[in-house]
């Protein structure tokens, strides 16, 4: 009888362990992870960290009524690892409001990491003086160069 109870307990424990996801897969709502595509409860992430490999970072550019003062939309490009990387930069005075990157020929899972992560860093710093994304240095440098070229073209 004790053996039967022990076997049943083991099976219950095993079935509970099999139902959990400890892989921290992107797209799960696990607030303890730091993976692209995860959402902390109550937090919205534009594009949910996804990249459609067409350069869309999932960031919506603000409309004319969303910002005070004069906003400018600037474009620039530079050579990335897989081909040309183009950026659209929206600025309001000295504030870099948004950076959208297009680099459809960059390596999935490597260069696309820079396309997904670097625009936010540039927006927060209001500068391209930010660290490159580890493993995607060429693409990161291309994005920063393209943003610098776009900013040089200001009125």
Image (cartoon, grey):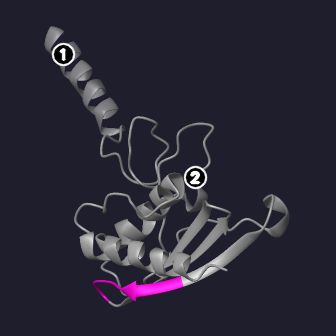
Which quadrant of the figure has residue 53?
Answer: bottom left
| Dot 2 alpha-carbon crowd within 10 angstroms: few under 14, some 14 to 19, many 20 or more | some
Which quadrant of the figure has residue 11?
Answer: top left
| Residue topped by disc 2 | 45
Left/right of residue 99 with respect to residue 132 in the rendered view? right
Where residue 63 appears, as percent x and y from the top left, is 79, 68
- The residue at the far bottom in this view is 83
| Dot 1 alpha-carbon crowd within 10 angstroms: few under 14, some 14 to 19, many 20 or more | few
Does the magenta run of residues contain 27?
A: no
- Which mark, by number, is residue 6? 1
Badge nearest the viewer, 1 or 2: 2
Please count the marks in the image: 2
Of 10 and 60, the residue lying toward us: 60
The magenta-colored residue range is: 76-82
Q: Quadrant of the C terminus?
A: bottom right
Where residue 84 appears, as percent x and y from the top left, is 39, 90
Left/right of residue 6 with respect to residue 62 in the rendered view? left
Q: In the image, is residue 108 above or below residue 14?
A: below
Of 153 and 133, the residue lying toward us: 153
Whether residue 85 is visible here, answered yes or no, is: no
Does the magenta run of residues contain 81?
A: yes
**SS at circle 2:** loop
Q: Residue at x 31, y 70 (%)?
A: 109
**SS at circle 1:** helix
């Amino acid at each position: 009888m004790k053996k039967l109870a022990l076997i049943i307990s083991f099976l219950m424990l095993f079935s509970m362990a099999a139902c959990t996801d400890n892989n921290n897969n992107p797209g799960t709502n696990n607030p303890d992870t730091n993976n692209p595509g995860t959402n902390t409860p109550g937090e919205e992430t534009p594009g949910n960290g996804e990249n459609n490999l067409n350069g869309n970072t999932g960031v919506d550019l603000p409309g004319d009524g969303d910002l005070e003062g004069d906003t400018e939309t600037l474009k620039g490009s530079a050579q990335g690892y897989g081909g040309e990387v183009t950026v659209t930069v929206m600025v309001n005075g000295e504030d870099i409001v948004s950076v959208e990157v297009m680099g459809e020929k960059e390596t999935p899972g490597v260069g696309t990491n820079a396309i997904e992560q670097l625009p936010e860093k540039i927006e927060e710093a209001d500068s391209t003086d930010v660290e490159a994304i580890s493993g995607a240095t060429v693409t990161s440098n291309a994005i920063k160069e393209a943003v610098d070229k776009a900013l040089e073209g200001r009125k």
